[in-house]
Amino acid sequence: MGGSHLTVLIPGLSQAMRTCQASVNSSALKKLISRGSVSALQTDSFESVAFSMFNCQQSGGRGLPVAAVSYYGITDQRPEGWCLRIDPAHLQPRLTKLYLIAGKPLAVTRDEANSLIAVIQGLYQEHGWRVYALDSDQWYLIVRDDPGVVTTPIAWAIGKDVDALLPAGTNQSLWHARMNEIQMAFHASPVNTIREAEDRYTINTIWPWGSGELPDLTAAVWRRVWSDEPLTRGLAKLSNATLNSAPKDAGGIIDNLSVGSDLLVLGDTWSVFDSGDPDYACAQLRNLEDRWWRPLWAALKARELNSLTIMDFGLGAVTIQDQDLRNWPPWSRFLTSNK
């Protein structure tokens, strides 16, 4: 089908809408969603949604190669070996269980990341480990061979007892021992001495996940991908889509529309709303309203854009056609008009 089509993926959008319901009720976003058709998503994480959008599925029960694709998305280099994410994390004891805390609540600095990565390199340099902090809270490990474990995505482990979520498989005992060794080394690090004195979460472990090798993607799914997020940038490059950074507002995309399907990604695993601060989440929603939803509404009404799909796990995929904004009875348009 001809025309211009834009899909917008924003992790955490539906949760923020529930948190900020009062400010959403009269928004352009709410009006767009109310006029669209909804399809359920058969996935339960940002990463699985991203891979499915590029027609790339996990194989052999090993999970999705998030680390390798993200590494490629950031560096433009194919990892020489097997790539894993080993993100910094905090294990919090509660009675007899250990719960995982990771991401924004840790607020890991670049200096802290570099210091702790040096600890890991010192432990396993002879094993050929290469560790990179491509972001302060996103660490990448490249090893020579398949690590021989199945891992749990970090988003599934956060806030849960980790006992049943640790690496499993042929080499699980080896990886459990390595994680224990790293925990002991981190405990002795000055980084955690300072954090403890400042009453901040210590960085007392790593969480291995997303292991695998780069997949082969030959069929182009998207005409253009707009993203600053590493995984979707990597998938775009592998599928030979035209890749651009996400613009500051909808104007940057509307001015470049043509026949075909474009993908815009705003956010990542942690999402633009994942701060634990409702006021921040509501401010982000208002920012999206002004920069994105109102201009996209106008573009649909003017037929500059033929269809728009808004995606999030709790929301599903909501698709609005340009005629959906014109085929309502006059009284409905009056009551819900976008001022």
Image (cartoon, rainbow, N blue to C red):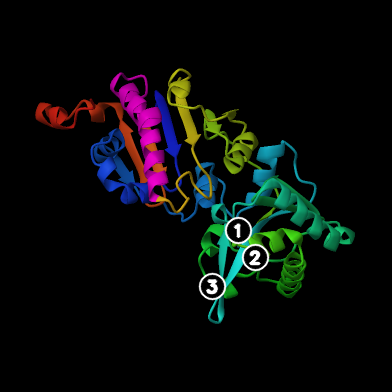
Crowding at mark 3 (Cα within 10 Å: few <14, some 14-19, many 20+): some
Q: CA distance from mark 1 to mark 3?
A: 20 Å
Q: Are marks 1 and 3 in contact (CB under 8 Å)?
A: no
Residue holding disc 3: 161
Q: Going from the N terminus, do you reach mark 1 or mark 3 first?
A: 1
Q: Please say whether residue 18 is visible from this viewpoint.
A: yes
Q: Going from the N terminus, do you reach mark 2 or mark 3 first?
A: 2
Type of amino acid at the residue the image marks with label 2:
Val
Tell me the quarter of the picture where residue 64 sits.
bottom right
Residue found at x 29% / y 33%:
28
Crowding at mark 1 (Cα within 10 Å: few <14, some 14-19, many 20+): some
Q: Going from the N terminus, do you reach mark 2 or mark 1 first?
A: 1
Q: Nearer the viewer, residue 24 or 155?
A: 24
Horizontal relation, residue 191 to residue 338: left or right: right
In the image, the segment drawn in magenta is 278-307
Q: Is residue 11 above or below residue 200?
A: above
Type of amino acid at the residue the image marks with label 1:
Gly
Question: Quick one: SS at disc 3?
Answer: loop
Q: Picture coordinates of residue 289 (x, y %)?
A: 35, 33
Q: CA distance from mark 2 to mark 1?
A: 7 Å
Q: Is residue 274 above or below residue 194?
A: above
Q: CA distance from mark 2 to mark 3?
A: 17 Å
Horizontal relation, residue 96 to residue 79: left or right: left
Furthest toward the left, the residue is: 331
- Is residue 224 rendered magenta in the image? no
Residue holding disc 2: 150
Q: Are marks 2 and 1 in contact (CB under 8 Å)?
A: yes
Q: Please say whether residue 208 is visible from this viewpoint.
A: no
Q: Picture coordinates of residue 167 (x, y %)?
A: 65, 68
Residue found at x 53% / y 58%:
155
Residue holding disc 1: 63
Type of amino acid at the residue the image marks with label 3:
Asp
